[in-house]
Image (spheres, rainbow, N blue to C red):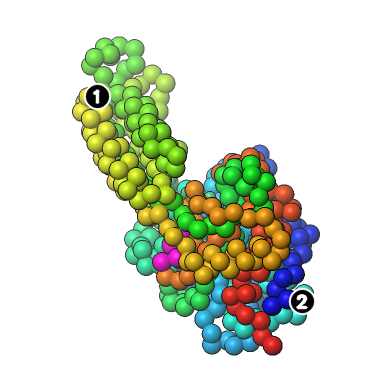
Amino acid sequence: MSLLSNLQCNSDRLWTTLEEMAKIGPGIAGGNDRQALTDADGKGRHLLAHWAKEAGLTLAVDTMGNMFLRREGAEPDLDPVYMGSHLDTQPTGGRYDGVLGVLGALEVARTLDDLGIRTKRPLVIVNWTNEEGTRFAPAMLASGVFAGLHDEAWAKSRVDAKGKRFGDELARIGWEGTEPVGDRRIHALFELHIEQGPILEDEGVQIGVVTHGQGLFWLEVTLTGRESHTGSTPMLKRRNAGLGLARVTELVHAAAMARQPGAVGAIGHIEVYPNSRNIIAGRVTFTVDIRSPDKMVLYAMREEIEAGIATIASDLGLEAKVEEVGHFDPVVFDEGCVEAVRAAAGRLGYSHRDIVSGAGHDACWINRVAPTAMIFCPCEGGLSHNEAEAITKDWAKQGVDVLLGAVVETAGIAA
Ligand code: HGY
Ligand code: MN
Ligand code: MN
């Protein structure tokens, strides 16, 4: 289709829209703190709903708060093509992680309106609830319920650090819908996202054609020793949970380093009790985040780390509890959808390369119930989950142009 070869979005409008959303839930250093089911998340949702109404899209919300904005197709009974991501952010999040995928999809709809193009299949823009998993673990919680990986009642029972329940917070911000979760047929789904790594920028490549997503385990570990005086307790009589944390941190790092290239591991969430300067930590709770594109490597890392934790606990006289709070196996995206992304980049003349996603995304779950693929654009220094996260206007535009091309090719253009 020659029309397909030159479909391009309105990058000024896209950029203005991104900047408007970034005003909601501002961080303290130029990024965003719009965590799932906070008032700021609620405000961001209302802004998206307002834009959707302006664009003539119809809004539906399911019982996990997932938002679906439908652009009617010439053949409304055909299964729609979906596009979207998430609006929730990390506490020290950037302006583009997830947001580019939702507002880029909105820009696709707006561009098609500008051009008077009606697709055969309907299009649906989606904002998945709680992708980040930072306030309510695990990540990709609502898309996981949608894809049948998590039970809805269990998901709604998840609590944040202050003991607030997901279900109560969703109702409190007024975004608990009535549509049963997962009650939708998806012809294909495309998610545009920043790479959150340095490869595209380092190589000067404009588009990442995401063929795979690496697998992940989140292990929540609690080491329990005994609080005691940091001054008067003899070194050999201590049951120091803080020392245990230090050794497990080293263990996780070593397990990943022994499996290069590819494996990664870190501990980003740590709670120390009682967290007093002159009390030996009696209890530490932390989350081990390990990932690999290779399922065997991922499972071997987990096994080594769990065995290591047991040894460390025994050596230090600690009790250890390990609970899996997040997991998905490595993902292979749909070949047909991946090819639609590759072809769209090629038609537009954008440089592109196949790439594996280091981060988890809602698309990783939806890939289990519908043909799915992702598009990456570069981000500056590969930095993300940091308020300094940045992209250029051109990278944003090019990513949306490829999303536009892949979606329109897949949905077909009505005569
Ligand atoms: O953890 C992740 O990979 C995603 O950012 N939630
Ligand atoms: Mn994201
Ligand atoms: Mn993220």
- The location of residue 200, given as percent across then percent down, is 62, 47
Q: Is residue 207 above or below residue 414?
A: above
Q: Are marks 1 and 2 in contact (CB under 8 Å)?
A: no
The image quarter in which residue 45 lies = bottom right
Image quarter where the N terminus lies is: bottom right
Range covered by the magenta-colored residues: 364-368
Image quarter where the C terminus lies is: bottom right
Q: Residues within 10 Å of mark 2 (few under 14, many from 20)?
A: few
Q: Earlier in the sequence, mark 1 or mark 2?
A: 2
- The location of residue 16, given as percent across then percent down, is 75, 58
Queried on whether the Cβ of the residue with tag 2 lies below 8 angstroms from ligand 2, the answer reads no
Tell me if residue 49 can be seen: no
- The residue drawn where x is 74% and y is 53% is 393
- Local SS, label 2: helix
Tell me if residue 79 can be seen: yes
Instruction: Indicate the amino acid at tag 2.
Output: Leu
Instruction: Indicate the amino acid at tag 1.
Output: Leu
Nearer the observer, disc 1 or disc 2?
A: 2
Q: Is residue 239 above or below residue 305?
A: above
- Local SS, label 1: helix
Q: Residues within 10 Å of mark 1 (few under 14, many from 20)?
A: some
Distance in Å between CA atoms under marks 1 and 2? 68 Å
The image quarter in which residue 141 lies = bottom left
Residue 140 sits inside the magenta stretch: no
Disc 1: which residue: 316
- The location of residue 208, given as percent across then percent down, is 59, 54
Disc 2: which residue: 115
- The residue drawn where x is 59% and y is 88% is 75
- The location of residue 120, given as percent across then percent down, is 62, 84
Queried on whether the Cβ of the residue with tag 1 lies below 8 angstroms from ligand 1, the answer reads no
Left or right of 53: which side holds 319?
left
